[in-house]
Image (cartoon, coloured by chain):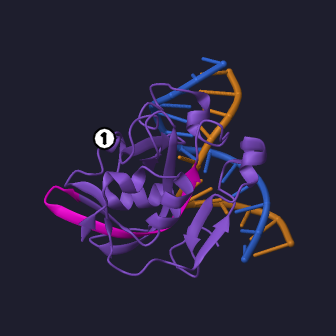
Chain colours: A purple, B blue, C orange
DNA sequence: TCATTGATGGTCT
DNA sequence: GACCATCAATGAG
């Protein structure tokens, strides 16, 4: 199990998003190792992307998004659910990939077919916001399998407010995977 | 099976 | 005070 290097994240956000599919998300805490396979993601490509939090500019909340690639951007939505993103591209770009669904691999309890659900199942909360994904307790690893070729493209979920950006095909998932958040 | 709604709190105006 | 990158429960059909 090889941890992904910084340079993996320091590339175009759509490329990173697609290549994250099939990779393993690993979280070690309280002596337990939890592992899940990433099967659905969304790309938030920068400050010009009106669906992206970074389009509102640099604030206390979006600070991590504008930071260097390969860090976790974790925030609370609707007062109760955490969403996990990985920061991409160069510092100052304000781009990230949201993890929307994963498939249980090891020590996973509960459902994982949605951003809030997967965060709960993996024990991801805001305490991991800004965490370096090159650390040894929270990171993404290469699964060693061959690259995924059956990738579906759809519009992102829950961003109807974003005008033309709401319709862009920036949501990617593994076709026919049973753990997708919605078909 | 699908559409609607309540829960709940951080963030920004 | 409004909005929200969600989820589960509810009720109509």
Q: Is residue A28 above or below residue A36?
A: above
Which quadrant holds residue A104? bottom left
Q: Position of residue A46 (x, y in %)?
A: 58, 41
Q: Nearer the viewer, residue A56 or A33?
A: A56
Query: Which quadrant: the C terminus of chain A?
Result: bottom right
Q: Position of residue A74 (x, y in %)?
A: 41, 44
Residue in view at x 36 percent, y 62 percent = A121
Q: Position of residue A108 (x, y in %)?
A: 32, 69
Which quadrant holds residue A60? top left
Please, which chain is the residue tagged with disc 1 on? A
Side of A54 where A135 appears, left or right: left
Residue in view at x 46 percent, y 30 percent = A61
Q: Is residue C11 above or below residue A7?
A: below
Q: Position of residue A166 (x, y in %)?
A: 73, 50
Q: Which residues are magenta?
A: A28-44
Residue A21 visible, this angle: yes
Q: Is residue A92 magenta?
A: no
Q: Is residue A33 magenta?
A: yes
């Amino acid at each position: 199990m090889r941890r992904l290097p910084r340079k993996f994240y320091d590339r175009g956000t759509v490329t990173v998003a697609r290549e994250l599919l099939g990779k393993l998300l690993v979280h070690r805490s309280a002596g337990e190792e939890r592992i899940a396979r990433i099967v659905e993601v969304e790309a938030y490509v920068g400050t010009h992307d009106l669906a992206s939090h970074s389009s509102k500019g640099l604030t206390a909340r979006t600070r991590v998004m504008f930071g260097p690639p390969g860090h976790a951007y974790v925030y609370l939505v609707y007062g109760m659910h955490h969403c996990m993103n990985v920061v991409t591209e160069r510092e100052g770009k304000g781009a990230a990939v949201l993890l929307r669904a994963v498939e249980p691999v090891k020590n996973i309890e509960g459902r994982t077919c949605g951003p809030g659900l997967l965060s709960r199942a993996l024990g991801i909360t805001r305490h991991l916001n800004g965490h370096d994904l090159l650390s040894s307790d929270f990171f993404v690893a290469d699964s060693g399998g061959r690259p995924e070729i059956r990738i579906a493209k759809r519009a992102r979920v829950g961003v109807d407010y974003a005008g033309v950006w709401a319709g862009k095909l920036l949501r990617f998932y593994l076709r026919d995977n049973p753990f997708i958040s919605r078909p």
